Image (tube, rainbow, N blue to C red):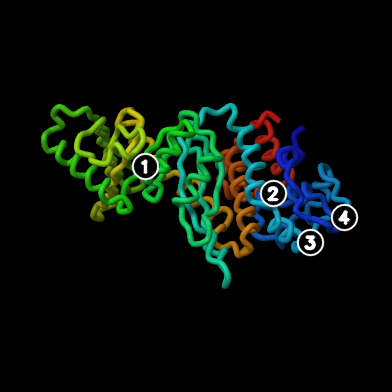
Amino acid sequence: MATPLTIQHHFRKLKDPRINRRKLHSLLDIIVVALCAVLCGAKDWQQVETFGKQRLAWLRRFLKLANDIPSHDTFERVFDRIDPRAFQRCFQDWVAAIAETLNIKHIAIDGKTLRGSGSSKLGTLHLVSAWATEHHLSLGQVATAEKSNEITAIPELLELLELHGAIVTIDAMGCQKAIASKVIERGGHYVLIAKDNQPTLREEIEKTIHRTLTTELEGVQHDQHSTEDRGHGRVERRHCTILIDPKGIGCQNEWEGMRVVGMYVRERQVGKEKPTIETNYFIGDKVMSAKSYLKVLRNHWGIENNLHWQLDVTFAEDDNRVTKRSGAENLALLRKLALMMLKRHPSKQSLACKQWNAALNPQFLEQVLVANANAGKI
């Protein structure tokens, strides 16, 4: 039966950061205990230690733990010394094993600030994440450098990803010529939302679309699609208009492969309140229907609901007070891995219930580990 040994398999190449120190605990044991603890809801290193001590007999079925459970200080020191890039390579090795049987068609990229990670010496940690929208799979993360932003982190993240025909969607910060070129270089397609950080591009798209709409789209290759959803007293209407190889975008040649510009309108009404309307303009390199563009743009925001929101609600990420930079980044990756594993368990329970079940029932925790091991063909 697959067990926490699966975790050891993927992290076996990770270099132990403890140099010239007497090592009472195996690095792989430390990682396995920490991940299992986070799966069960541990929020910090003290809780990781407490979980380990409470589950010592169960953990010893799979781990040596010759010197029992490490102290919380040991967990903190080790995770702060692990190179986050090396830790992520191990994470991606696991994800690649799972993704091998999946056809990943859409990757959403977005950033999130860990609000509790700041200190008097360092600002808050900001991580840019990649999310396979159809499969609810975390594909990787990159921290923005101090005094930097997502513009520099996104190309680094793209270098880590296997795109191979997938559509990559990025909000306004990522609407950059170099990022569009990087997506094409890596074998993917892009849909980039143009806002105030690209004022000329946004204005030209808006004028071109509105001018074309007022002439009833005569002689212009185009497509439109609308949807309406009702439920719980809410009505949401979405409309997408795309123009293919449009005329009037003066900077079009500066964006590698750009063939499509579009407008995405979302109208939301709750009860008898006045409806709110949000309009976004975007560019893309792939010629496809307005229905497909609407679906991709709608699914892009799933990274907020299915990743970022869940990290805050289920794992209380914003409340986490781990401030040491590498330790906070590595712990964030453990949370993403735990979230992925809980989502992939076939139970119909909510994530919070799955986590609570794993905390109370070692057999359920083992089922979560087995489900993900089987998915990765290990």
Residue that numbered label 2 is attached to: 35
Amino acid on which the number 3 mark rests in the picture: Ser
Amino acid on which the number 1 mark rests in the picture: Leu
**Tag 2 or tag 4, which sits nearer the N-term?**
2
Residue that numbered label 3 is attached to: 71
Kindly report which numbered mark, 1 or 3, lies closer to the viewer in this rendering. 1
Query: Foreground residue, 232 or 38?
Result: 38
Residue 313: x %, y % from top left: 53, 55
Residue that numbered label 1 is attached to: 192
Residue that numbered label 4 is attached to: 67
Amino acid on which the number 4 mark rests in the picture: Asn
Rendered image: mark on residue 101: none
Residue 74: x %, y % from top left: 77, 60
Amino acid on which the number 2 mark rests in the picture: Leu
Residue 70: x %, y % from top left: 80, 58
**Horizontal relation, residue 248 to residue 325: left or right:** left
> Which residue extends farthest bottom?
120
- Mark 3 lies on a secondary structure that is loop
Q: Is residue 354 visible?
A: no
Query: Cβ–Cβ below 8 Å for labels 2 and 1?
Result: no
- Distance between the alpha carbons at the discs numbered 1 and 3: 46 Å
Mark 4 is surrounded, within 10 Å at the Cα level, by few (under 14), some (14 to 19) or many (20 or more) other residues, namely few
Answer with the quarter of the image where residue 48 lies.
Answer: bottom right
Answer with the quarter of the image where residue 4 lies.
Answer: top right
Query: Cβ–Cβ below 8 Å for labels 4 and 1?
Result: no
- Distance between the alpha carbons at the discs numbered 4 and 2: 19 Å
